[in-house]
Image: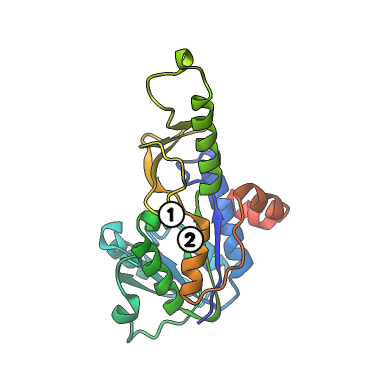
Amino acid sequence: MSGYPVPVPVPVPRAESIHHKLYEFAKTALIKIFVHPYATVCDLYCGGGADAEKWDGAQISHYVGIDVVSSGINEVREAWESQRKSFTSEFFEADPCTDNLETLLQEKDIQADLVCCLQHLQLRFETEDKARRLLSNVSFLLKPGGYFFGITPDSSTIWAKYQKNVEAYHNRSSSMKPNIVPNCIRSENYMITFEIEEEKFPLFGKKYQLKFSSDVAAETHCLVHFPSLIRLAREAGLEYVEIQNLTEFYDDNKHDDECWSKSS
């Protein structure tokens, strides 16, 4: 089976901050780019079903939501069933990065035109086994020629900024060095904190805390090593298309007034 992973690295937002607006913009633009009318869509880690209106506007025919029980998927199912939508829907309790969906859903005959993971994709890179299982499940769910796309923070940029901080620290004279190696990346909009200093980009399991200025508390994320993502996707039968930074993605799609107005 062939498919196409297209993760677009963007920050995970909160509240009505600029990060939230950019995140919503990215989701709306991705759906507009890849979804065609009457498509079957499978949404991994669908959460609270906040994108129902986006899928409705894309004129899909069928929606499949998959998430763990703790996400409140039962409540989402009940809410969706009580609403009139232009498409049918079904929900399954499973963890796509640990469960074998081919075994669990073999009688459901799901053949999705599109599989997406619009939140928590980076957490699947806690271990290689989890990332591998996720991509294997994506390959099972996709029909030939279908697309897989997702959203994750830009780990390459995060790691480059972190390494720049560490290098600057080591280049200081001993009298100027603080007692603790700098493990934070700070700006007026966010703060990223790593637990320990490392010289090489770990392929899996490198955790950090991300807190935007509008957040009450930080959230735990994992770096996504993009070459490893591409390798595992290829092993699962998926063909790499593109990985794009949010800035580039926004520049390429910001002139689409209809797309922006829907996300505002």
- Which of 8 and 64 lies nearest the eye of the viewer? 8
Q: Which mark is residue 228?
A: 2
Neighbours of disc 2 within 10 Å: few (<14), some (14-19), many (20+): some
Q: How is the image coloured?
A: rainbow
Quarter occupied by residue 44: bottom left
Q: Amino acid at mark 2?
A: Ser
Mark 1 element type = loop
The answer to whether one can see residue 75 in this image is yes
- Which of 226 and 167 lies nearest the eye of the viewer? 167
Going from the N terminus, do you reach mark 2 or mark 1 first?
A: 1
- Residue drawn at x 33%, y 84% is 106
- Residue drawn at x 71%, y 56% is 256
Q: CA distance from mark 2 to mark 1?
A: 7 Å
- Residue drawn at x 56%, y 73% is 239
The percent position of residue 83, horizontal first and vertical second, equals: 40, 67
Which residue was labeled with disc 1?
203
Q: Amino acid at mark 1?
A: Leu
The percent position of residue 229, horizontal first and vertical second, equals: 48, 62
- Which of 171 and 131 lies nearest the eye of the viewer? 171
Q: Is residue 182 above or below residue 19?
A: above
The percent position of residue 151, horizontal first and vertical second, equals: 51, 56
Q: Is residue 104 above or below residue 244?
A: below
Mark 2 element type = helix
Q: In this image, 162 relative to 137: left or right?
A: right
- Residue at the extreme top: 175
The answer to whether one can see residue 186 in this image is no
- Residue at the extreme right: 255
Neighbours of disc 1 within 10 Å: few (<14), some (14-19), many (20+): some
Q: Is residue 224 above or below residue 159?
A: below
The percent position of residue 103, horizontal first and vertical second, equals: 30, 81
Quarter occupied by residue 219: top left
Residues at discs 2 and 1 in contact (Cβ within 8 Å): yes
